[in-house]
Amino acid sequence: ETVESVTSVSHVSQFREKGVLTPEEFVAAGDMLVYKCPSWSWEAGDPSKAKDYLPKNKQYLITRNVPCHQRVAALGESVREIAMEDAEDEEWTYTQTLGAAKDGEAREIEDIDAEEEPKSMETSGTEEVKAPVTAAPESQDEDVPDLDDLELDEDDAILPDDPSVILPSPAAGAASASSGFVKTRSYNISITYDKYYMVPRMWLFGYDEDGRPLTHAQVFEDMSQDHAKRTVTIDPHPHVPGVSHASVHPCKHAPTLKRIIDQIESGDSGRQMRPDQSLFLFLKFISSIIPTIEYDFTMDFDA
Amino acid sequence: MALRHPAPASSLDASFLSRIASLKLHDLRLSLRPLPFTASFCLPHRVPQGSSSSPSQPSQERLVVAADALDLDASAIKRAVLTTGEVTIFNTIESFKELDKKQFLHNIATEMCRQIDSGEVEENPSLLVRCDVIVFSDLKDYKHYYWFAFPALCFPDPPTLSDSILSMEDVMSSDMIHQLHIGYNGLLESSGNGIPPFFIVVEDKDANTVSVKPLSHYPACAQSGKQVLFGFVDHSPLQSNPGWPLRNLLYFLNRRWSLSDVTVLCYRDFSENMQRESQAEWHSRQGRRADSDRVKETLSWELNQKGKLGPRCADLAPFMDPKRRAIESA
C-alpha cells in the first residue's frame, strides 16, 4: 500500500504492448463485464477507502453467492484435465488460434496457467508474495455451546410445520430422496484495480453450505493446489475495512494477459484485442486457479 | 396440487456483520431500535458452458445482505430484487434468547397487513418481499449470532395449483413474448429502486399485444375487461416450483382485491440483451378468500444448519485485520 500511494497513475494505454490497464480502461472493461454478465455489478465500497482515480460508484466489481459444488480435490486428476480441454474447446477463439499455431494441443495453455506462472513467481523474489495462511485458527464449532441452547424447544410448538416449503437436499450428490436443489458453498468474488501492477486483482470470500464464513484453509480447498501454494495470498480487502480475503496475487497478471492477447492476435491476423475485453481474458485464466467456482464470464468477443 | 416453494437461504456478508458490530459499539450502544436494511436476491449465475463441475442440481436461492445493506440509497441502484426489513441488535445473548419469536413474527405480519390495507403495497410492492434479522454480536470474540425470518403470510389452507404449468411459448406468440420483455425493461428503467418484484401483464389477444404495468394499475385494467396476469420475478432454482415471494403476492391479491383464482407469470429472464430463451411459466391458483383480517400463521424463521429452529453463528475472528484487532482491544 505504501508503494501504491507513491506510484503515479498512468493514463497511457499499454494494453496490447504490456497487458496492463489504465484506470479508465479498467472502468470500461468493468462496464462491459456488467453489461454482458448481469450477475456482476459495480460497488462503491467503504467511502473512506475510495480511490480518487476511479469513479466513486465504480470502485470495484463484485459477484455474490457464486456456487461452488465441489472441492478441487474431488476432481480427479484425469477428470480435471479433460475438463480443462472441454472448457477450452467449447468456448473461444483463443483455443482455436492456439490450435492453429501449436499442433492443436491444449498444452500451451497449461503452460501458461499451471507451470510458467508459478515458476516465474518463485524466481521473481517479490516480497509481497506471502505463504498461504493455513494456520488460520479453525473455528471450533464445539466451542459455542450456547448455540444449542438458543434453539426453540420442540414442545413450545410455537411454529407449525410449513406445508408450502421445500427444503434443500443436504449436500451435492445426496441420495435420491432429493428435493431437486442443494446447499452449496458459495463465494463472493470481487475484482479491484491494482494501481501498482496496473491490472485487475481478484479477491475471494467464501461461505459454507450453511452460510458460515469459510476459513482461509477451507478456501484453499477450492484452489488448484499449484496455485494455492504460490500465487494466493491473504490480505485485507482494499475496499472492505478489517476483513481479510484470499487474493490471487497480481504480479504476473500483465505478462499472462499479454501472452493471451498475442496468441489470439497471431492466430487471427487483423484481430486486435480491445482493453474493454480484458476482464473476460482475465476471468478465463483465473478460472484455471479456481476451477470449481462457477462464476459467470460468458465469452463474446464480437460484441 | 399444493403449491410449494423452495426455501431461500440467508447469506450475510462478513463485512455487514463487521459494520453492525462497529455501529453497536459506537452509535447504538444499548439501544434496541431496529434499523431498516435491504437485502437482495441474487441474480442466478449462468454456469460457463462446458464447465467440468456443471451441477446436476441447482443451488439454493440466496438472499444476500451486503456491506451497504444499511445504506438504503446505495442499495437502491442495485439490479436485484430487494427486500425490506429490519435488523434488531440485542445487547446480551440472554435477551436474544428470550425474545418471543412468535410474537416477533406476529408483529411483522400485523404491520404487513396494515401496509396492504392502506394501499402502500400497491405503490411499493417490495414491501411484500420481506426479511428480518435479529443479531447478537459478541464484540470481544468477533462472534455473531444471527437469525433470519422470511415472513410469509399464510392462508388457512395452502394455495393450490389448479392447472399444469405451461411455458410462455405455449400461451404467447413470440411477438408477444418480445413485447413482454420490452415492457418489463421499460418498467425496470422507470423504477429506480431495484428490480420491481411484482407487476401486471395486460393481454389483448385480439390485437395480439401485451403490455407491462405496475401492480397499482390493476383495478383500472380489470375494469377494462382485458385479461390481466400477475407477474413476479422468479429466482426459484426449481423449474416447476415458483419462488418464495409469490406467497405474499397471493395473500395480498386475496386480501386487497378479493382474488382467489389468478394466473401468475413467473418471470425468469431478466438479462440485459434479451437474447436468451425465456423461461417464464404460467401458474394459477385456486383458493378461498383469506378470512376476515386475520393471518392464520406467519412463517417462517430460517432453520439452522441442523435443520432445527435456531440461530446461526458466524465466527469472524480469523478474518479480522490484526492491526485493527490491536487497535480495538487496546
Image (cartoon, rainbow, N blue to C red):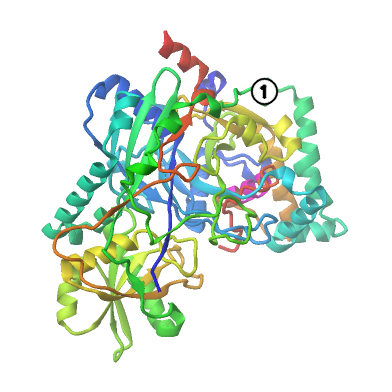
Q: Dot 1 surroundings within 10 Å: few (below 14), some, or many (20 or more)?
A: some
| Res B311 → quadrant | top left
Residue B247 position within the rendered picture, expressed as x and y whole percent measured from the top left: 32, 62
Front residue of A89 and A228:
A228
Q: Chain of mark 1?
A: A
Residue B208 position within the rendered picture, expressed as x and y whole percent measured from the top left: 33, 87
Residue ID at (17%, 58%): B294
Amino acid, disc 1? Lys
Front residue of B108 and A237:
B108
**Is B135 rendered above or below residue A73?**
above
* Residue A51 in sight from this viewpoint: no
Q: Residue furthest bottom?
A: B206
Which residues are drawn in magenta? Answer: A279-286
Front residue of B314 and B51:
B314
Residue A195 position within the rendered picture, expressed as x and y whole percent measured from the top left: 55, 31
Residue located beneath label 1 in the image: A130
